[in-house]
Image: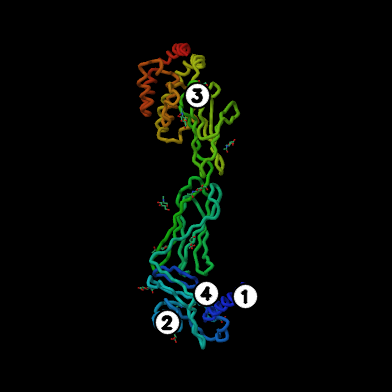
Amino acid sequence: MACSENMFFLIVLFMSGVLACFGQRDLIATMPDKLDGLTGSCVEIPCSFDIPEQHKDKFNSAIQTSGVWIKESPQFGGSPDNVIFNSSETVNRYQGNITGNMSQKYCTTVLFNVTTSYTNRYFFRIESQPFRATDNEKSVKIVVRDLPSSPNITVSGEVKEGTPVSLNCFAVAPCPEHPPELTWTLPTQFTTEKQLHENPDLTKSVLSMVTFTPSYLHHEKNITCTAVYPVGTSNKTAEHNMMLNVSFSPKNTSASISPADPVLVGSCVNLTCSSTANPPVTNFTWFQISGDKRIQVASGLSYSLNVTVGDGGLYFCEARNSQGCGKSKEVQLAIKEPKTSMVVGVAAGTLGAFLFISLISVFVWRRNSRLHDGLESTDNPQGQNSPVGTVCANQATAGEEPEEPAEDQSEEIHYGDIDFSKLQPKETPAAAQDRVQGQESEYAEVNVTGRGDKVQHRNNLDGLYAQVN
Ligand SMILES: *[C@@H]1O[C@H](CO)[C@@H](O)[C@H](O)[C@H]1NC(C)=O
Ligand SMILES: *[C@@H]1O[C@H](CO)[C@@H](O)[C@H](O)[C@H]1NC(C)=O
Ligand SMILES: *[C@@H]1O[C@H](CO)[C@@H](O)[C@H](O)[C@H]1NC(C)=O
Ligand SMILES: *[C@@H]1O[C@H](CO)[C@@H](O)[C@H](O)[C@H]1NC(C)=O
Ligand SMILES: *[C@@H]1O[C@H](CO)[C@@H](O)[C@H](O)[C@H]1NC(C)=O
Ligand SMILES: *[C@@H]1O[C@H](CO)[C@@H](O)[C@H](O)[C@H]1NC(C)=O
Ligand SMILES: *[C@@H]1O[C@H](CO)[C@@H](O)[C@H](O)[C@H]1NC(C)=O
Ligand SMILES: *[C@@H]1O[C@H](CO)[C@@H](O)[C@H](O)[C@H]1NC(C)=O
Ligand SMILES: *[C@@H]1O[C@H](CO)[C@@H](O)[C@H](O)[C@H]1NC(C)=O
Ligand SMILES: *[C@@H]1O[C@H](CO)[C@@H](O)[C@H](O)[C@H]1NC(C)=O
Ligand SMILES: *[C@@H]1O[C@H](CO)[C@@H](O)[C@H](O)[C@H]1NC(C)=O
């Protein structure tokens, strides 16, 4: 029981201490802990007061009550200069005005034309007949700066492509009579809505809400909220930059095949999928098109296979993340099959010669533009050209070709059809050079065109080829 007795005394001691504390407080002022001011502008101090119970009888709201602001310390006896505002005086150290209705216990005060020297703590005091009291516990810290503080941007909810999203920009308005003007800079169309917002501590902010519909093109783009504070005849600005993080389903999904040229059965081929997505792709899936069906053949960024006869055909990949999926264009895995070449070759040779000559000029012209298209067009050649164009026979073997010039290799398809490099040993160095020097192969192709008649040799040599194999 000794324990609970001790507790009791402790509680009594604590309560009396609290009461003593409140007892000493002759006035209870309510105001923010801290305010930010801007040089040359005004500062409004939201303020109200109350009379503690023990003094209630001494305060008469019907009697004219004046408000006094004291800086630094509530005791001004020794330093009367600390009394910076007294509503009974016509001239004060600080220019200001008590805008609150004192008889309703509102003491909201506006200080005009503040400067950095105003940065201090301020106490409030009331003076009436006969009651005079200072709240020596509560003070407001005013910090005046030459430049405004930056506004805040908050995002409510997820920023997802295609889903309208709202962002809020808050800027403090220490001088509500001259609030800042908020403007947005966004990479897209938007609508805004603004309002003067009262914070829990009764200070004011200007709130501007912007609504827009993000697209994946806005990912990692900056948005800015700019606050323009009118100060006298000029403006002071502060801004907040934010980089958008837009969640989007896989985009620019493309499949590439390495080596790009037709391969012999038994060689290794890599199919690689690429895509941009946020969050990153979690699942790549490979499909082969068989007739009008799509058959899932693998999952993973790349699909490596040791080619068998049945593997030839069209493939595409699908990239998936939490936002959805993207599908690549189809790529052709072409298999060099000597026997087929012979049968088709005889028939197609003559026709091919015509097609080839007429297509060459088109390709030379198109290549020029495509070469500048960058990586994304990796899967375009197959997508844009007829599948016939991709059936070809280059001498590339697995792993021999660098991956980057894949685009050029798929173009070389056309010599492949003729297979000069094999037929005419003299051509081999040139052909090899073509492969190394991507762009120069254009000229090589032109040369080949000039030898259209030599295509005829193909038939004979196809037979030879077949025999060799
Ligand atoms: C405020 O002004 C009144 C009238 O001049 C004066 O009587 C009073 O003492 C002043 N209060 C303070 C704290 O200086
Ligand atoms: C002080 O505030 C009151 C009430 O808002 C207003 O009527 C008065 O004109 C103001 N005085 C000055 C000097 O701004
Ligand atoms: C202040 O409040 C009193 C009492 O409610 C009222 O009579 C007076 O008109 C108010 N003064 C102003 C300036 O609003
Ligand atoms: C504000 O204060 C500055 C210097 O203290 C003074 O030059 C200026 O005239 C004042 N402006 C107003 C509107 O009182
Ligand atoms: C800005 O955000 C910070 C951190 O969340 C907060 O402390 C500050 O009060 C905010 N300012 C405004 C003007 O809302
Ligand atoms: C200040 O900004 C406002 C818009 O917020 C603009 O209309 C005004 O022309 C600007 N004044 C100066 C002096 O730049
Ligand atoms: C985007 O904002 C960052 C700071 O948040 C800045 O460093 C960058 O230069 C800005 N980029 C553009 C394009 O404005
Ligand atoms: C491909 O498979 C065949 C038969 O299984 C094998 O002989 C050949 O070495 C393999 N090729 C590669 C490059 O793995
Ligand atoms: C952007 O958002 C994605 C998905 O919501 C998240 O995984 C990633 O960490 C975010 N990045 C940044 C820089 O916030
Ligand atoms: C990837 O997606 C495919 C097809 O939707 C599914 O069969 C496979 O299980 C998925 N893999 C993972 C690791 O989620
Ligand atoms: C296929 O990809 C694997 C792993 O990325 C690599 O080790 C291999 O050399 C590639 N093969 C070819 C033929 O590109």
Ligand 11 within 8 Å of disc 3? The answer is no
Give the CA distance from mark 2 to mark 3: 95 Å
Which residue in the rendered view is the most extreme toward the right? 1
**Res. 216 in view:** yes
Give the class, few, some or many, for how many residues have Cα within 10 Å of label 1's Cα (few <14, many ≥20): few
Give the class, few, some or many, for how many residues have Cα within 10 Å of label 4's Cα (few <14, many ≥20): many
Q: Which mark is residue 30?
A: 4
Give the CA distance from mark 1 to mark 3: 94 Å
- The residue pinned by badge 1 equals 5
Mark positioned earlier in the residue sequence (1 or 3):
1
Q: Which mark is residue 332?
A: none
Q: Which percent across, then down, holds residue 388? A: 50, 23
Amino acid bearing label 2: Phe
Q: Which mark is residue 334?
A: 3
Identify the secondary structure beneath mark 3: loop
Give the CA distance from mark 2 to mark 1: 44 Å
Amino acid bearing label 4: Thr
Question: Residue shown at 49%/71% (left/top)?
Answer: 32
Nearest the eye: 328 or 73: 73
Identify the secondary structure beneath mark 4: strand
- The residue pinned by badge 2 equals 76
Mark positioned earlier in the residue sequence (2 or 4):
4
- Whether residues under marks 2 and 3 lie with C-beta atoms below 8 angstroms apart, the answer is no
